[in-house]
Image: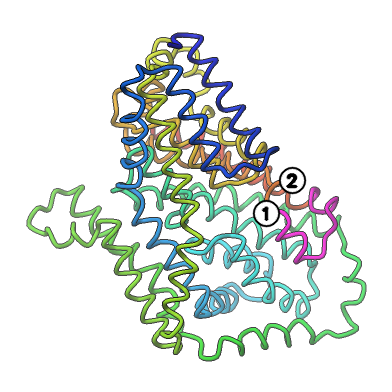
Amino acid sequence: MLTGFGLLFGLLIAIVAMIYMIAKLKVHAFVAIMLVSIVLALLSLPIGDVANTIRDGFGGTLRYIGLVIILGAMIGIIVEKTGAALTIADTVVKLVGKKRPELSMMIMGWIVSIPVFCDSGFIILDPIRKSIGKVTKKSSVSLAIALSLGLYVAHVFIPPTPGPIAAAASVGLADNLLLVMGVGAIVSVFALVPSYFFALYIGKKVVLEDEEDLDDNPNAAQEAYDALKKSYGKLPNVWLSFAPIVVPIIFLALGTIARVLDWSFLPFWQFLGDPIIALSIGMIFGVMLLYITDRMGDFSSITNENLKIVGPILFITAAGGVLGRVIANAGVVAFVTDNADALKVLGILFPFIIAAILKIAQGSSTVAIVTTAALMGFYSDAGSVMTALGFTTPIAAALVVMAIGAGSMTVSHANDSYFWVVTNMTGMTPEQGYKTQTVGSLIAGVSSIIGILLLSLFLI
């Protein structure tokens, strides 16, 4: 069996093989992660322990996170399909004002992407971007990158987006999602501020060919946006549009307060604050959205669509749990512990670097987040990489989730579907996409990890 440096070298080869299968051979991430996990288990564990290790890693992960991912994604797709996302977007524009359209687009994207995937969010909000561009005569590129990066930041940092939820569960914070949300909101500021100024700057440097014809039909974008809103029929009001997102956060907060202050005389608060219960309540408001917008008849098709979306994520998350369990049982953690002084030099940069390597190599932020988080393990587990590196408190674990998220958006390029969504819908060439979306995601990721490093100096 592999031990010591041989085991660490085997793990390195396994990760390289996994990346190669996903990026070059186009093997599904679930299959690739499971294959390397099984091979690594066969090489490093007693043969009698292999099956149980795989079984425990797979089932244990889904036990903590399966329902939360399904409910979170369900809320997102309902917000999208009912037109609530458009109501949210209109509200943000009214609050921020059309004098700062780039800021409006960025905040709008950040809010909408908390429940909705960034790819879907960009598609939903792009007509608003075009309309605002026509009205304000602002750079199409500036507005697009502001929207894109606003969406991307929430996508990698803030639950109930599946990636951050899965990462939270993998490091032991499945019951403390409010902490992850709060830290994610703070870290978002470090990413959004430089991203905003980059969007303003790059809009002056990259000009699209069709922007020269802005005056030919100044009402075209507004007409397209009006047609989009009309296609939804009856749109929900502002309060009900925000409710599926905001109400679960409120209940998570109540539960956290009751738990932290040990208010055992308020068990119902703690019940409501459980992530599964809080998101279930959010789902109730989602069903109300369907009813108010006369879409109850679409509930079955929306549910089926949601399960098709979250199915691969659940499988990848479970496969990541298998890899994490194999790593723990094989003795990698013991080796890291014995050599922790060398690795502790990297500190919070360690998960960031791993996630960034995975992101750059295979393109998916979610795969990068899930895989890296699985490698880290529970902060409360004495046999985890988290413990070996000194991340042994809930706040330290939350910052690790943030570091993984920062790495997972560093950088978006041609192997990332989001790169093509942004460039194609904006009308940019691939070369322009590299100058805008790729550089912008690099700035957002690097500025995020700088902010995380600063926070870690005070909080860890």
Q: Is residue 13 above or below residue 191?
A: above
- State the CA–CA distance, disc 1 to disc 2: 16 Å
Of 281 and 88, the residue lying toward us:
281
Residue closer to the observer: 409 or 9: 9
Quadrant of the frame with the C terminus = top left
Q: For the residues carrying marks 1 and 2, which lies nearer the camera in this image?
A: 1
- Specify the farthest residue to the left: 265
The mark found on residue 417 in the picture is: 1
Question: On the picture, is 361 further left or further right than 271?
Answer: right
Label the magenta part by its dominant secondary structure.
helix
Q: Please state which amino acid type lies under the numbered disc 1.
A: Ser
| Mark 1 secondary-structure assignment | helix
Q: Which residue is depicted at the point 12% across and 58% down?
A: 267
Q: Name the foreground residue: 383 vs 310.
A: 310
The reply, left or right, for residue 26 in relation to residue 141 is: left
- Residue at 52% x, 29% y is 36
Magenta stretch, residue numbers: 417-435
Dot 2: within a 10 Å radius of its alpha carbon, few (fewer than 14), some, or many (20 or more) residues?
some
Q: Are marks 1 and 2 in contact (CB under 8 Å)?
A: no
Residue 185 visible from this viewpoint:
no
Q: Which residue is mark 2?
A: 439
Lower sequence index among marks 1 and 2: 1
Q: Position of residue 323 (x, y in %)?
A: 44, 32
Residue 418 inside the magenta-drawn segment: yes
Q: Position of residue 384 (x, y in %)?
A: 36, 25
Please, what is the three-letter code of the amino acid marked with disc 2? Val
